[in-house]
Amino acid sequence: MYNIKPSVQAILDRGGTSMDAAVILTYRCNARCQMCHTWKYPSRREQEITIEDIEKLPSNLEYVNITGGEPTLRDDLVDIVGVLSKKARKVEISTNGYFTNRLVEVAKKYTDIRIRVSVEGLPRINN
């Protein structure tokens, strides 16, 4: 489904400068933040990036931000972090922090993971 341009892959294969990446796992979200509106246009599970797609990413990434929508809505988040942890020096999950049990599960298995919790506004604006 997702292909890396041959020119980018050639640079990486020659030991060129590493790259950063953002992997958008889903456009589904449990929050109704007024500053974002992603929740108004959710993806269907069958439209979302797969582990097979993620495995095609280059292996010498410097930093990967796992984002969405809300990435903790993915049932395979632990597996995705496992694949990306082998491909990048630093892996970060950007989340609204609602599903703490899922974040703790990932952090217990991948202790060097970074977790960025967004706090975008006061409750009357942010939900």
Image (cartoon, rainbow, N blue to C red):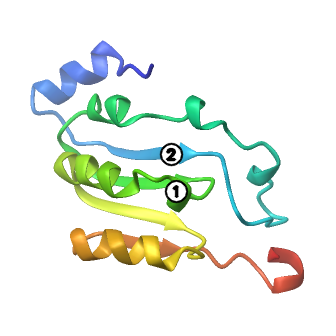
Q: Nearer the viewer, residue 36 or 76?
A: 76
Q: Position of residue 9 (x, y in %)?
A: 24, 22
Which residue position is annotated with label 2? Answer: 25
Within 10 Å of disc 1 (Cα), the crowding (few <14, some 14-19, many 20+) is: many
Return the residue found at the far top.
6
Q: CA distance from mark 2 to mark 1?
A: 6 Å
In which quadrant is the N terminus drawn?
top left
Q: Residue at x 24, y 53 (%)?
A: 82
Q: To which residue does mark 1 refer?
A: 71
Residue type, label 2: Leu
Looking at the picture, which amino acid does disc 1 mark? Pro
Query: Residue 94 appears at what percent x and percent y?
Result: 50, 64
- Give above or below for 101 relative to 92: below
Q: Which mark is first along the chain, 1 or 2?
A: 2
* Screen quadrant of the C terminus: bottom right
Q: Residue at x 36, y 17 (%)?
A: 5
Residue 23, quarter of the rendered image: top left
Are the residues flagged by discs 2 and 1 in contact, CB closer than 8 Å? yes
